[in-house]
Amino acid sequence: MHSSILIIANRYIGPILIALSLVALYRGHNYPGGGFIGGLIAASAILLRALAQGWPKTEKNIRVRPMTLLTVGLGLAMLSGLPSIFLGNPFMTSVWGPTWQIPVLGKLKLGTPLIFDIGVYLAVVGFTLKSAISLGFDTEEESD
Amino acid sequence: MPLIISLAMLLAASVAAPLLRHVAVSRRVFLLPVPALAAFLLLAFGAGPSVFQGNLPAFVTEWVPAIDLTFALQLNGWGLLLALLVTGIGALILIYATGYMGGHPQAARLYSYLYAFMFAMAGLAMADHLLLFFVFWELTSITSYLLIGFNHGDPGARKNALQALLVTGLGGMALLAGFILMADTAGTWLISELAAKSPEIIASPLYPAILALVLTGAFTKSAQFPFYFWLPNAMAAPTPVSAYLHSATMVKAGVFLMGLMLPILGGTQAWTLTLTIAGGITLLIGGLFGMRQTDLKKILAGTTLAVLGMITLLLGIGTEKSVLAAVLVLLGHALYKATLFMVAGSVDHETGTRDTRALGGLRKAMPFTAAAAALAALSKMGLPPLYGFLGKEYAYKSTLYSGSDIALTSTLLVGSAIILALALRTGILPFWKKASSAPLPKHPHEAPPSMLIGPLVLGFIGLLAGIMPFLFSPLISKACTTIVGYPINPVVKLWAGFNLPLLLSGITLVVGLLIFRFRTRIASLQEKFTPPGTEAAYDAIFKSTLAFANWQTRVLQSGYLRNYLIIITIATGALILSKLARFGSFSDLTFVNSLAPAGATIVGLMMGATLLAVIAKSRLTALIALGTVGYGVALVFSIYSAPDLAITQTLVETLTVVLFAWVVHKLPAYRSFSSRRAKIFDATLASLSGIVVTILVLKSKSVTLGPRMSDTLTEMSYPLAHGANVVNVILVDFRALDTWGEICVLAIASIGVWSLLGKRPAKSRH
């Protein structure tokens, strides 16, 4: 499906979707969204691109393999549970940093749950991509 | 403190040994035995003196408080003996191994395993907590498995390693069960406290079970009848391993356990009968096995079995005298058997064969090896003034004055005579027999110094300790003290005057020489009359287990998705219904009385789409219909103010439909193969499972299992977790561990998808 429409559209839609996914990830703590939803959006964006130009080229563009994303996501989520141990709390108790006032974004509160959510985000992206690609979801299949 | 330091050194050495990989053939290899030697010296001179004074060194720290498991070490006299054997002989074996393995590319792996094993054995000797003892016990089984299977390219070695692991591993399971029952009965896990509880344990109705389970563990480990068969097969291991594990140390673990258990479980008729009978049978079977072998290592394995049987028998008698004899036999055996194994390895290494029929006249070519072999063989034959003599004398002394002296003494006599004959064959013949005319595979020459140190040192100790038995007497009496359970101080003398045991020794010598003289005739007689051993039973069980697994897989894993779906659906439905039945009648189900117009429209749409999916004639239609149902669910979520769920549902539904469409359009056209009956069955099953789920949903509104969590979570969301979105807070904070489990499932699922579908053949690109 070497569709010019898809390729051109992707140039604009792709980055917007990725940005949207990051917003969903960040605002998840207070409003609807979160790592799972963000991850799905990001994966959709990448899959759209794969649909337009084939997976090998897309993989080259994103510079990272889905399995790596999945592994890093799992690891990050687990690591986010460790700091609490050093404070004498059970594993995966949340640890919060100070609150910053940042223009535009407003109040920014950083803590281990955000790191955990980033881990979920990466894992979901990795999982979705890996499964979709395994199912043959790219243009290469079309060309034979 | 010396205990934990020596353990740590051994463990560190095991981890560090692979670093020697690149220097394995270089000069730095002399560093290899240093940790073992250091541990030996630390135990002998750091821990030893306080053991001799009766002030047992200990080390205790918490491990798993929830199951009352402490990392409790305590070194008693019996443990000290074992720990010194393990580290001392271990150091010599390591020196030997550097020569034996030479430039073997994977020698470092062997050294690492050997140290891991040494760590496990030393820990076993020190463990005071039953569970800790079990952990070390299993570690020795696993390291033994790795060592037997060291040459993993050889299917025979793999099979034998597995056999040893299965036999000793299953024995270990029995041991664990026995330990749990014992600790439950006595109310303590500590071996040092159990002896005081002995009357309670013996009086308990569980005593027969405890005894049977613990002895199963000990018998499998020490290769007692009927579990003896794995030991000769374990000779597939490289010779240093056989010398170390399967003669001097690991097989002693079972005997060590029996010694520990004697003051706790011993003294009953069941104990005495089981141990003396099993030990006696093993003694004879081992000897007879050795008689019909021609491989040096197999003959030695046979005598190892025989000696282990003898020790078991002596521990079974359980008197002060017999315990002393058992300890003497054990020490003597460790000294001479490790030597003979190393000699066998050297002979193999320098001549290229271990076949006793081909070997002869090596005395001139290998004088030092011959000297070590002679010392060890004479000790094994039980001739004065070597240490082996003492063990045999005291064994006779103890059986002569026990209850059933005739039977036990004659068993011992026959066993000792066979061992004597086999000692001549393994230690003397290869060196002093006239060389056979056929040339050996390699031109024989003396072994390198590294392969001489171990045999010579151990052989010399056997001589020295025989002449001056008082050298080892503190060690021996403390070991006996542990086993009998109260302090004793036996005097061991080389010359005790002309007495009945000495006469029996003389008879043993004569009978042994006769057996040696007629060895070929006895062996050929055995060829005709050897009954199948218990290994046949093992093989039968092993094969039938595999056959059962195959059959079960064939039945359960049909490979048809429809069968799996049927099983899953029925099982799920049945489980739900059985749970629901616990909550009484289904009369209190409440249906939603009023439905908002919007909701009603969505539900109607979903029902229509479902019907369409069922009757659709093409996959794509069915897929789109199902997608409609999914979006309907998302709409329901958003109506009932669950935006997170709605968004997720929409995204997942979209991705699923697109992906499925991608797959579906590549499949062949829809055709119906199902018979009418199958269709009716499927429809019924689907409707029933739908009804079950509906009941579940309705029922869940009326059943409360506990206080409602959701209100608390909502309240605590902002103050505790700084998040206003409670769904997200639950996911990433309150129940983060659950979420982590879920993303792990994602990882597993994607690996599954990948392995099922990802292996696409390389496509032609254009």
Image (cartoon, helix red, strand yellow):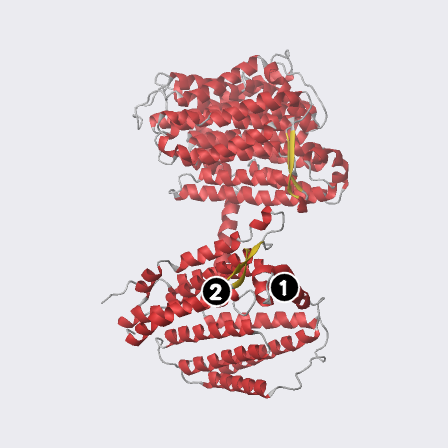
Query: Is the residue B55 above or below the residue B155 in the image?
Result: above
Which chain contains the residue that carries disc 1? B
Name the residue located 63 percent from the left edge and 76 percent from the top edge: B697
The amino acid type, in three-letter code, at marker 1 is Ser
**Distance Cα–Cα, label 1 vs label 2:** 46 Å
Q: Nearer the viewer, mark 1 or mark 2?
A: 1
Badge 1 or badge 2: first in the primary sequence: 2
> Residue B315, position in %: x, y?
65, 30
Which residue is under mark 2? Answer: B557
Lateral position of residue B607 relative to residue B433, left or right = right
> Residue B550, position in %: x, y?
47, 59
Residues beneath discs 1 and 2 located on the same chain:
yes
Residue at disc 2, secondary structure? loop
Q: Examine the rendering and report whether any part of residue B291 can be seen.
A: no
Q: Quadrant of the C terminus of chain B?
A: bottom left
The image quadrant that residue B184 belongs to is top right
Q: Residue furthest left?
A: B766
> Residue B592, position in %: x, y?
66, 83
Q: How many marks do you count on the picture?
A: 2
Which chain contains the residue that carries disc 2? B
Name the residue located 52 percent from the left edge and 66 percent from the top edge: A27
Q: Examine the rendering and report whether any part of residue B132 can be seen.
A: yes
Name the residue located 70 percent from the left edge and 21 percent from the top edge: B488
The amino acid type, in three-letter code, at marker 2 is Gln
Residue at disc 1, secondary structure? helix
Q: Quadrant of the N terminus of chain B?
A: top right
Name the residue located 59 percent from the left edge and 52 percent from the top edge: A91
Which residue is under mark 1? Answer: B717
